[in-house]
Structure formats: C-alpha cells, structure tokens
Image (cartoon, helix red, strand yellow):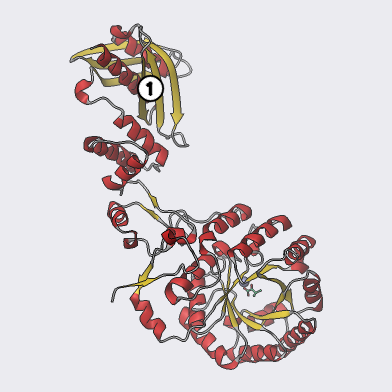
Amino acid sequence: MGLKLIYTVDWINNSELMQPTLVSELNEEIIKRTKLPKYVRIFDTTLRDGEQTPGVSLTPEQKLRIAHQLDNLRVDSIEAGFPVVSEGEYQAVKSIANAKLRSEVCALARCSKEDVDVAIECGVDCIHLFIATSDIHLKHKLKMGRKDVLKRAVDHVKYAKRKGITVEFSAEDATRTDLDFLKEVYKAVTKAGADRINVPDTVGVITPKAMYHLISTLKQEINVPISVHCHDDFGLAVSNSLAAVEAGAEQVHVTVNGLGERAGNASLEEVVMALRSFYGIKPKVRTPLLVETSELVERLTGVPVPPNKAIVGENAFAHESGVHVHGILSFPGTYEPLSPELVGHHRRLVVGKHAGMRSIEKEVREMGLKPTKKQLEEITKHVKSLCDKGKRITDADIRAIAEHIVGKLPEEKKAVEIKEVLVSTGNTITPTATVRLVVRGKERVGSSVGVGPVDAAINAIRGAIAEVSKLRLKEYHLDAITGGSDALAEVTVKLEDEEGNLYLSKGVREDVVLASVEAMINGINRYFLRRS
Ligand code: KIV
Ligand code: ZN
C-alpha cells in the first residue's frame, strides 16, 4: 500500500503544472466499492449563504464582481441572492441574471408566490425554493403542521414550474427531519416538477456516516439529481458533503472560503480539490483560479482567510521545519500532496526557529548573496535568536541580516572591536554615551553628549578614535525592517575620508543605538583597512 498518482490537471496545458497529486492508495480501496456519480455540480452560494456570514454585506456592484469571478472559475450554478429581502439585493440578483454568465444563475425563494414572482422578475435561470420540514422548525418557527408544509411546498413548486423555470427544492433542516416525512416531501415535490432536490444540513448536525445513509436512502426513492448543503457547526461540512457524494449526490452547495451562516458552509476550494484528488471527479472549476477567487472574496467581504485554511490559506504550501524543507527541496511530493500551482498558490519556505541552515541558505542564495559556510552559520544563529524572542521573521529581515553578515569584514581584518556601549537619555537629561572599544589590541574609552542617544554614541566613538577625526559622516539612514516597536533596525552609514573615498556600511540590531554604533564601527574598519 503506498501512494497513488492521480494526474488531475487534464485541462491545463502548461506541462509545468502537471505535478501529480499524491494521495493514499487506501482511499482507492474504499472508493472501488462505491458507486460514484460521474459528475458533481458545483452550486456556489457565496453570494447568498456566504453573504449571511455575520457582519458581511455586499453592494450590488461587489456581488456582480464576485459573480463574474465565479463564472470565470466555471462553477455550475451561482446562487446570486434572496431578491425579496431588499431593493439592493433585488438589483444585485437582477444584474447578475442579466450579465450573460455561463453559469446557471439562481435566486432563493421561500414557498410564497411573492418570493417566486420577484425571483422570476429578476430573470434568473433557476429558483431555489425552500421550506423547513423538521418538527423543531414547524413548531417554533413556522407554527404549521406537517400536512400544511407539504401542501405549501408542492403548490409552490407547481407554481414556479408553471412559469417555466428550473426549480431546486430544499427541505430546510432536512437532517433533523423525520426520515419518513422527509421522503414524503421530496417525493411529492419531484412529482410536482422539482428538477433537483437539495438536502440541507442546516445546523451542521450530521456525521459523514449518517449523511451517507440519508443520501443512499433518498437515492432509492427519488429520481431527480440530489444535492447537499452542509454547514460547518462541528467542522464537518466538507466531510459530510463528500459522504453525500459517495452515496450518490450529484451536486454540492459550497461557498468560497467556507463563508456562510454561523460557522459557514462547505468550502468550495476544499470540496473541489477533494473531489478531484480522492475520487477522480472533475468539476469544471478552473482550479488555478482558486486562490485569486479566495482573495477577491476575502477583500470584498472583509472576512480574513485564516493562514492555516486548507488549499487557499497563506500557510497551505508553506514549510518551516528543517526536516520538511529538506524533503521539499529534494522532492516536493514528500510534504505537498498537491502542487501549489494547481490551485494558483505558491510554495513558501518559511524561516523560523525550526528552520534548518538549508532553507536559510536557499533563501539567501535566491537573494543573490553567496555566504560562506561560516557566514551561513552566523546568519542562521542570528535568525534563530530573533525567533526565540518571538519575532516573526520576514524575507526583508533575512536579507538585512544576511547582507550585513556577508558584507562584514573577516574578524582578522578588523582593527576596531566594540566591547561596550552605554547610553542615557530622557526628557530631562542631556543624552550621553560611553563606548568601550578595542583598537588594534588596545582598549580605549570615549564619552560624549549629543542631540540624541545616536548622536551621543557616534560622538563618543569619535572621541575614542582620534584617527577618524577627518572621517565625515556623509549619510545616515535608518530602516525599521518590519513593523512594530520591536522591529529590527537597519542603519546604513556612508563615511567619506579626506581623499573623497566612500565607505558604505550597515548595522542590524533590534536597538537603534547599537545598530548605529555597529554601522559606524564597520565603516571605520573599512577605512582602516584601506589605509593599511
Ligand atoms: O442552511 C440552509 O438550510 C439554507 C437553506 C436556505 C437551504 O441555507
Ligand atoms: Zn445554509
């Protein structure tokens, strides 16, 4: 039993993307015994259930922008909204319905003539008609009996069908509905003309095995395509959707980034990639557009995608530990079941305290630097010590550290060494600094004041090393490499000697004064080296 190679990117011409998806062969054993549907429709409800995410509200223009993206992604259906709820929603659904999209455009409607009429007025291709069927909803929400609910469902399916529109019917809270009654409702609505039935796990309360059982049971009774709509209250939305497919469901409701009421719905990107990778079922979705779609929805809804979100999260293809990076560098399949390019993502080797020298070396070499082994060790040590202090290291940090270390003079060529730096500053005292240095093997101490602690420290250096009296500080530049008051400070100084020679040097520390002293001393060492 080992790995199974599945070439999932049949429709992508770029051969570079033809990386195999490596999943366990054990799946295959189970799937062999399952009668899977040939095709699974992707019904995207980002613009309806996704917009019901607490705090999310999209303008009609934003909804149209997302609809175009979903169409470009090639989802089969776009649930554009619930047009009866507001004028803006009505306009949004109407504009999406009139946008000549390839995808089927659907609108949500309760079992009410007004809802159906308004949806039809918008010009949609399909009505998603729903009514609750569980006793909890009947008793506490609808205050109706089962018979009335059944009649209402049938009447409105017939009403919508008479208008010549595709009808998908949902029995809201299906998974908490008495199974016999549920079967009765679904049979009656299909007889009334419903084109598809949808099974909502409205509050995410079913397990994959139970979902498998439910869909298998319905499959025996219903002769129209069956769809599922799973919520993620227990984190099972994707698993339940896949279990439904294993039982024969031909359509799955999904949302981009798993948005939706409460904990959200099954995520589009996870369901699509799982269908392709585990079952060989290939929805039309153009997977390389998944990340950009996720980013667009994140930006417009304002709901951030967690970094550890499968498929599209920032860390989905990021590797930190030395062992993993080693594996990835020799064969990506060791720690990447699917290729990042397949979903429009990119691989990231993150440098953190678990990083090995190899990943730091790769990173640094990609920056065009050629450190020696010793320098590499020093860079790695520096990076890890920052990580141990809880800092998040970025590429810019590594660059600054590496440039600084690679650009440093070898120890034996340094005439000046810093031993100690003391500064005192405040709003009631004059900034004062004392530096203790070793110059060509002899200790020297210098003290001075300045307009600030950096100025005082530089003056103290000048005081300690009389030989640099003619060395002019031509430029001083301070960069905070990353945000935050604990950011790494990178100080660059340009010194000019009496003959006009320039000495550019850097200091990189978490402390601005120390970084400045380091930059000055590095420049002075270069000056001494030249003179000798
Ligand atoms: O979760 C749900 O039951 C729904 C229905 C409207 C289908 O979103
Ligand atoms: Zn829902």
Foreground of the two, 510 or 336: 336
Q: Is residue 529 left or right of residue 339?
A: left
The local secondary structure at tag 1 comes to helix
The image quarter in which residue 294 lies? bottom right
Q: Quadrant of the N terminus?
A: bottom left
**Picture coordinates of residue 61 (x, y %)?**
72, 55
Disc 1 crowd rating (10 Å Cα; few below 14, some 14-19, many 20+) is many
Foreground of the two, 335 or 267: 335
Q: Residue at x 71, y 75 (%)?
A: 126
The image quarter in which residue 529 lies? top left
Relative to 530, does residue 180 appear above or below in the rendering? below
Which residue has dot 1 on it? 516
The amino acid type found where label 1 is placed reads Ser
Q: Quadrant of the C terminus?
A: top left
Judge: label 1 CB < 8 Å from ligand 2. no
Is residue 53 in sight in this rendering? Answer: no
Q: Residue at x 38, y 82 (%)?
A: 30
Q: Is residue 78 left or right of residue 353?
A: right
The image quarter in which residue 124 lies? bottom right
Relative to 456, does residue 145 appear above or below in the rendering? below
**Picture coordinates of residue 297 (x, y %)?**
60, 57
Q: Residue at x 72, y 81 (%)?
A: 143
**Picture coordinates of residue 74 (x, y %)?**
59, 67
Total number of numbered discs in the rendering: 1
Foreground of the two, 425 or 252: 252
Is residue 375 in sight in this rendering? Answer: yes
Judged from the image, the quadrant occupied by ligand 1 is bottom right
Q: Is residue 168 left or right of residue 347?
A: right
